Amino acid sequence: MGRELDGEFLLRHLVSTISTASSGYVIGAAVGLILGLAISLSQSFYQTFYPFLIWARATPSAAIVPVAIAVLGFGSSTIVFLVCVMTMLQVAVTTGLALVQTKKDYLDVAAVYRFNAREKLMLVRVGANLKNLVVGLQAGLQSAIGITLLAEALSSDTGLGAYIVYSLSTFRLDNLWFALVAIGLIGLMFNAIFHLLERFVPGLSYG
C-alpha cells in the first residue's frame, strides 16, 4: 500500500472505495425497488417475505460481513455482492412499507377514475410516496458506504477501509485522518446528488 499522501492513495484506495460502493449500490438499489414494488402488489408476497427482510435488515452488519467473507472468500466481487445485498434489503423494506401504506383516499380516487393497475402503481402508489422512496435510497447509500469500508478493512488490501487499518497498524495518524476526511467528502458528494434531485425533480422538495 502507499505510505504517503500521494497519487497512489487516490488511485488504489479512494477510487477503489467509490467504485466498489457505487457498483454494489446501483445494483442493490435497482433490485430493492423492484422487490419493494412486488411486496406492495401481492399480499401473500408481503406476508411471506416482508418479515424476513425486516429481520435481515435489523441484523448488524458487523455480524453479517465477517461470516459472509468467510463463506464467499476474499476479493472485490465479494465486497460488491455484500454491498448489493445490504442495499437491496434497505431499499426493499423502505419501498415496500411506503407503498403498502399508501393512503386509502388516493386509491379510492384512482378507482373512481378507473386507473388501470400500472397507473395505480406508478401515478398513485409511487407518486404519493416519492419522498419516502428517496429516503430509502439515501439510507441504502449510507449502508453501502459503511459496508464497503467494513468489508475492505476485513478482506482487502485496497480501499479506504484497508488503508485505515494499515495506517493504524503503522501508526501513520496523518494518513488515518486524511482517510477519514476523504470518507466525509464521499458522503457529502453523494448527499449533494440527492439534494440536487430534491431541487429539480417535482414532488421531492421538503421545503
Image (cartoon, rainbow, N blue to C red):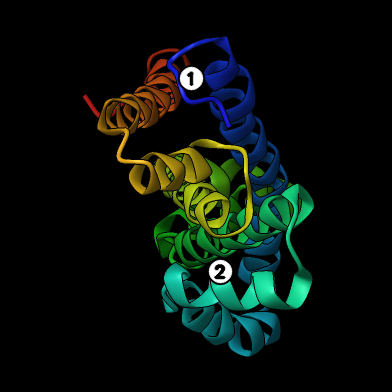
Q: Which mark is residue 201?
A: 1
> Is residue 141 at all visible to an observer of this figure?
no
Specify the quadrant that holds the C terminus: top left
**Disc 1 element:** loop
Give the vertical position of 56 relative to 107 (above or below). below
Which three-letter amino acid code belongs to the residue tagged 2? Val
Task: Examine the rendered structure and indicate whether residue 37 appears above or below residue 130.
Answer: below
Q: Quadrant of residue 78?
A: bottom right
Q: How many marks?
A: 2
Instruction: Compare residues 18 and 123 and report the one nearer the observer.
Output: 18
- Inter-mark Cα distance, 2 to 1: 35 Å
In the rendered image, residue 32, in percent from the top left (x then y), is placed at 65, 56
Q: Position of residue 76 (x, y in %)?
A: 73, 48
Picture disc at residue 65: 2
At horizontal 48% and vertical 55% (from top left) the residue drawn is 150
User: What is the x, y in percent for residue 127?
Assistant: 52, 40
Q: Label 2: how many residues lie within 10 Å, few (<14), some (14-19) or many (20+)?
A: many
Given the current orientation, which residue lies at the most extreme front position?
A: 170
* SS of the residue under disc 2: helix
Left or right of 207 in this view: 94: right
Mark 2 or 1, nearer chain start: 2
Instruction: Name the residue located 63 percent from the left edge and 26 percent from the top edge.
Output: 12
View extreme (left): residue: 207
Q: Position of residue 130 (x, y in %)?
A: 47, 41
